[in-house]
Image: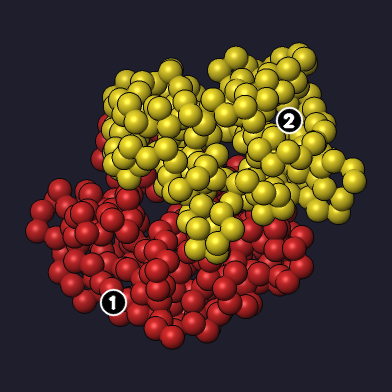
Chain colours: A yellow, B red
Amino acid sequence: MTPPVITAYDWVPDFARGLVRDLPVRWALEETGRPYTVRYLPQGSQKGSTHRALQPFGQVPTYEDGDLVLFESGAIVLHIARSGSGLLPADPAGQARAIQWMFAALNSVELPIADFGMASLFERDMPWAKDRLPVVRARVQDRLGDLAARLGEAEWLDGDFSAGDLMMVSTLRQLRGSGLVEAHPALAAYVARGEARPAFGRALDAQRKGFTGQPPQSAAMLAMQEEDA
Amino acid sequence: MTPPVITAYDWVPDFARGLVRDLPVRWALEETGRPYTVRYLPQGSQKGSTHRALQPFGQVPTYEDGDLVLFESGAIVLHIARSGSGLLPADPAGQARAIQWMFAALNSVELPIADFGMASLFERDMPWAKDRLPVVRARVQDRLGDLAARLGEAEWLDGDFSAGDLMMVSTLRQLRGSGLVEAHPALAAYVARGEARPAFGRALDAQRKGFTGQPPQSAAMLAMQEEDA
């Protein structure tokens, strides 16, 4: 059986290394013991028509397995979880709850986090940055407070480690360096538990080793990838 | 068999009517012909501990079916789609692609749209609003351009109408009044096709008829629900 092929960038700026969204896909493949190969894209080429035929928004990752082509990291992780074992409970109710946490990670939790990422990185030098950042930060704090209250002292969000935890840890990692997760020691420990999993370590290492390319030639190309980070 | 119970608000401000997230859940239940009952929450009570035991972020909707309790509209719609018929293709590859569009609606497409919603509604009177809104608007335009290019002249995103279209139409409807969807006639026609489905009409009508309650007493309560809209 030919292993599935994913796409990843051959170069991203330092702040994005370890955060590009092929990471949760690599992590899911590692958790389920599935070998894979990577097609690396030079910066800029993700916006070309060849890649857009696979990914309409000109981003990574994509996933190709025989005739099946998928984009959107959450959908790819769910497909991998459903095709293998170890990432979803066997009982239908437990499975629905694990999937619920995937959607929570990518919608309810990521919405304010993505806004915070834009505000603290790409709008950093805008005239409104100083006044607006605390507002955005407060929204993230609210959401993390709710999440921490639900997690409590549990190891994972619902029973054993699942694709829901994989996506939630991946989303929370976007806040690294902000101190926001660290304000909730139980949440910080939760992220650390995810990052301590051997499969995560292998996935992170593989992503890092893939950055063998060159930065793009122009600032315009850099701006184009901002939303992929 | 006892029908599932969802939660919805008994009052929201006019701008949010027809957009609260119990709508896609009602729509999915209508598409699959599943009867349901609604527990209406007076404004403010969604932030109390009783509701938070079901929904950690203090929002609607929730879904209760026997012992199964779910939150997060995407997860609920997917669960309904997998439990019934008419919202997911039978073949595994087609099913994975329909789910891919659900995640795309709730992540890649909604991220800039949610930011635009915050900017145009809740940050409207902030000192930065005038300068920042065009920046946020441009991000939505980029994403919609990509989506419109992928949709082309097709009726739905991938073959027959699916849970992916249900979520995408629901996400795009958040832009009503902005003119952003209308800039792409094929995309506007796509949303109109979704809204013309009898199941959508029944769902919208049911949501509207549920607003029999009173507005909250304080501005603080109104602010609390802003992210639910």
Identity of the residue drawn at 35% across and 23% down: A182
Toward the viewer: B37 or A201? A201
Instruction: Give the residue number, with chain letter if any, for mark 2.
Output: A8
Where is residue B148? Give x, y as percent. Answer: 67, 54
- Give the number of marks: 2
Chain under numbered label 1: B
Quadrant of the drawing holding the N terminus of chain B: bottom left
Residue under pointer 1: B210
The three-letter code of the residue at mark 1 reads: Gly
Which residue is nearer to you in this view: A16 or B187? A16
Residue B26 in percent (x, y) is at 44, 74
Q: Residue at x 39, y 27 (%)?
A: A188
Dividing the picture into quadrants, the one containing residue B167 is: bottom right
Q: Is residue B13 left or right of residue A23?
A: left
How far from the left and from the top, in percent, is residue A213?
77, 16
Assign a secondary structure to mark 1.
loop
Q: Nearer the viewer, mark 1 or mark 2?
A: 2
Task: Tell me the distance, in whole angstroms, between the alpha carbons under discs 1 and 2.
Answer: 47 Å
What SS does tag 2 mark? strand
**Relative horizontal placement of residue B101, taking residue A195 as reference (left or right):** right
Q: Amino acid at mark 2?
A: Ala
Q: Are marks 1 and 2 in contact (CB under 8 Å)?
A: no
Q: Is residue A37 above or below residue B164?
A: above
Q: Identify the residue at horizontal 73%, vertical 30% (top origin).
A: A8
